[in-house]
Every structure is written in structure tokens, then in C-alpha cells.
Amino acid sequence: MTENKPMISLNISESKTLSHSRYSMSKDEGRVLVMVMEKMERDGGINPGGEYWFSVNDYCDVFKITRDEAVKDIKKAIDKLGERWVYVKENGEEKAFRWIGEKKKKVQQGLYGFVFWPAILPYIHDLKDQYSMPLLWHASMKNEVNKRILKWVHECFANKQLEINIDDLRYKLDIEQSSSYKIYNNLKRRIIEPAVININEVTEMNLQFEEIKKGRKVVAIRFVWDEILQIA
């Protein structure tokens, strides 16, 4: 008799505060976090201690990769997440803390997990500070930067526009210190335009952007859209 497998959650709830904080991470690191959030959504509850697990099989199902690829990506991503910092601004103060403090695995069961850093748990577990986005959109983004821009757009979808200051964009993506991205044309060509293309490939929102200038300098970007968000 085949055991029924719990259905993977269609929507993932995440912290708004963390989404707008300063950090950088790879696509695979973002995927590992998504899988933990998916498991939290599926189980319908939170672990006060911040320990969460997910299966390699679910990872393969969501991201359409082989088991060998998944195990390699998961191991590397969890190792790297242990080194990452996230910076949160509140009441004029910037606080910094790690994403995770402990990593775990049950190889025979095909399970990987970790314990969130204690200081980040209030943001992970605050249900009043969360918004939901389809899991398929997470899986369809080519990199974490594209996914974060889609998150910001989706969060204010009803307004049909989102204005982001260029300095704020550099801050949130943690690229302020990059000499290359201090040049707006590089930011536009390598980050903004590819993100818009990727989002339009997997949704029907017809996302576009407008440059807001002060004199000759581009100081902000206004994203605009006019269609229903829908996975292609």
C-alpha cells in the first residue's frame, strides 16, 4: 500500500520586515529558506525554538532537479547561510544578526534542517508582519534578486505601482559597496532589466519601469503593471 504524501503548500508566507532588510544570498540559499517556510505553512504551526526540517524529495519536486543536484545544493546553501548576515533597520537603528545558528541532517531519512538564529525568530514567527506569495513564483525566479523585486511588487500589487529610491535599492540588495553598481547603467543592465524580463516570463502582469530623475541623475525607479499576477 502506497503511503499518501502530504501536499506541498501552494503559498508561502514570509516576513515583510525581512524582505525589506539588507542582505544578499544565492538562489540555492533562498530556495532552502523557501522550503523551510513551506514546511511551516504545511504543518500549520511554528516551533518556538526555531528548529525546522524539510525533505530532499520535496526540494526535487519543487525545483525540478535531480536528487544528486539537490543534495549538493542543499549542503552548500545551508553552510553558506550559517555565514550570512541580515541587517534590519528599526527606529533609526540598524541591527545585524545571522540567519541560522545550527545545521542538522538525517541522511538516511533524506531530511535537512537548521535552527534559526534566536534574534531572527521574532520576525520569522510574527504572523502580523507576513504576506503570502505563490510557491511557483519562488521556484520560477532565476535568482534571489529577481525574486525579491517580485516580492516587493506583489506586496503592493493593488496600487499598480511601486517606487524605489536607487540608494534604497542598493541598500536592500547589499550592493552599496560595489563600485560597479554605483554606476546606474550597470545597475539597470544587470539587475533591473533582467528582473523585469524574468517576472514577465512567468507572470501576466506586464511589468515595466520608469526612471525618475533629479536633473540628469536617475534617483528612483517606478515599477508599473496592469495585469493580473498569474503563473505562466
Image (cartoon, helix red, strand yellow):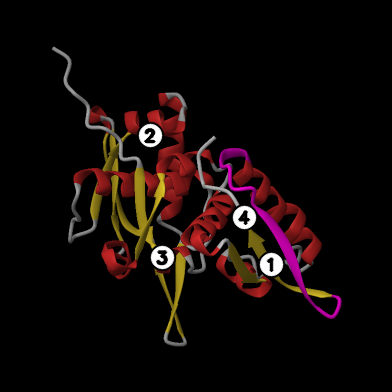
For residue 206, say whether it is visible.
Answer: yes
**How far, Cα to Cα, is label 2 from label 3?**
24 Å
Pointer 2 local density, CA inside 10 Å: few below 14, some 14–19, many at least 20: many
Which element is circle 2 on? helix
Q: Nearer the viewer, mark 4 or mark 3?
A: 4
Pointer 3 local density, CA inside 10 Å: few below 14, some 14–19, many at least 20: some
Is residue 143 found left or right of 57 in the rendered image? right
Under mark 4, the amino acid is: Trp
Which element is circle 1 on? strand
To which residue does mark 3 refer?
Answer: 16
Coordinates of residue 147 in the picture (x, y in percent): 53, 51
For residue 225, which numbered disc appears in the image?
A: 4
Q: Which residues are magenta?
A: 201-216
To which residue does mark 1 refer?
Answer: 221
To which residue does mark 2 refer?
Answer: 59
Under mark 3, the amino acid is: Lys
Coordinates of residue 98 in the picture (x, y in percent): 39, 64
Q: Quarter holding the C terminus?
A: top right
- Whether pointer 3 and pointer 1 mark residues with C-beta atoms closer than 8 Å, the reply is no
**How far, Cα to Cα, is label 4 from label 3?**
21 Å
Q: Nearer the viewer, mark 1 or mark 4?
A: 4
Which element is circle 3 on? helix
Please tell me in which quadrant of the rendered image residue 192 appears. Answer: bottom right
Which element is circle 4 on? loop
